[in-house]
Image (cartoon, rainbow, N blue to C red):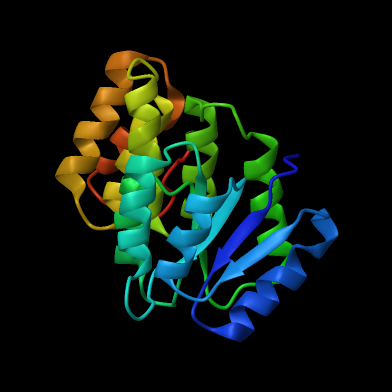
Amino acid sequence: MSSKPILIVDDEKNIRLALGMSLEKLEIPVETAASGEEALEKLAQGEYALMLLDLRMPGLDGMEVLRRVSGEMPDLKVIIITAYGSIDLAVEAMKLGAVDFLQKPFDANQVREMVRRILEKAGEAQSYWDYLALAKKRIEEGYFEVAGVYAQKAVFLDPGRPEALNLLGGIAESTGNRREAEQYYRAALARYPHYTAAKLNLERLAGRTYTRQDIVWD
């Protein structure tokens, strides 16, 4: 993994300390910033492997920091930190280029696993299969909107494959949009007519007794 430090940005001292302690086992240098302004100053002075960034901070908030970083430092990996119930912000941040998000409260193992996964792929472009795996993980956790962003990124990278389109169909169903779900399932089958998951989903969607249960994700 990278020898460059990780930058933790959060206005709450306890969060900075908790994240720093969570990352100790990775044996990677950690630096902290208590505000968006301080974070930008540190980023201008040195290189970092990864930034963990709280979105809600007084003054220059995390979303504005992310916007600037996305434009000026596109190679910097950013994990955003959100409070419970702020998934809409997480979705917006993903669209701006954040690679993943942590929702408060989080545990040390969750933090380490996410950071390790991202750093191990540092320097590599995220692949179709990377985004597909992230989408499935977020679906399992019930974060359908965030999963949808990852699935859309997968489709962008390889529009000829059916798996991500099927996931988008399932996400649409899970949020109550049957028409959109049908369009995604049919799009998946147009790419690969024998793709079982999309075929089963479309049959269930068109069945006399419709139910959102038993969506086939893969």
Give how far across and how far down residue 140 sits, in percent: 52, 55
Q: Residue at coordinates 69% horizontally, 45% vertically from top-left?
A: 4
Q: What residue is rendered at 37% in x and 14% in y?
A: 192
Name, please, the residue furthest toward the front.
45
* Residue at x 42%, y 21% (from the top left corner): 195
Q: Is residue 146 above or below residue 123?
A: below
Residue 198 visible within the image: no
Give the quarter of the figure containing the N terminus: top right
Please indicate, yes or no, whether residue 182 appears anywhere in the rendered image: yes
Q: Is residue 211 above or below residue 129?
A: below
**63 lies above or below 157:** below
Asked whether 119 or 208 is in front, the reply is 119
Residue at 75 percent across and 62 percent down: it is 23
Taking the view exactly as shown, the residue that stands out farthest to the left is 179
Please indicate whether residue 10 sits to the left or right of residue 165 in the image.
right
Q: Quadrant of residue 2?
A: top right
* Residue nearest the viewer, comparing 111 with 41: 41
Q: Is residue 81 left or right of 186 when viewed as pictured?
A: right
Q: In the rendering, at what x and y percent does residue 106 appear?
A: 61, 73
Quadrant hosting residue 151: top left
Total residue callouts: 0
When the figure is inspected, residue 134 is found, relative to residue 129, above or below; the finding is below
Residue 217 placement (x, y as % from top left): 46, 40
204, 47: nearer the viewer: 47
Find residue 35 and report its horizontal and vertical position in percent.
45, 74
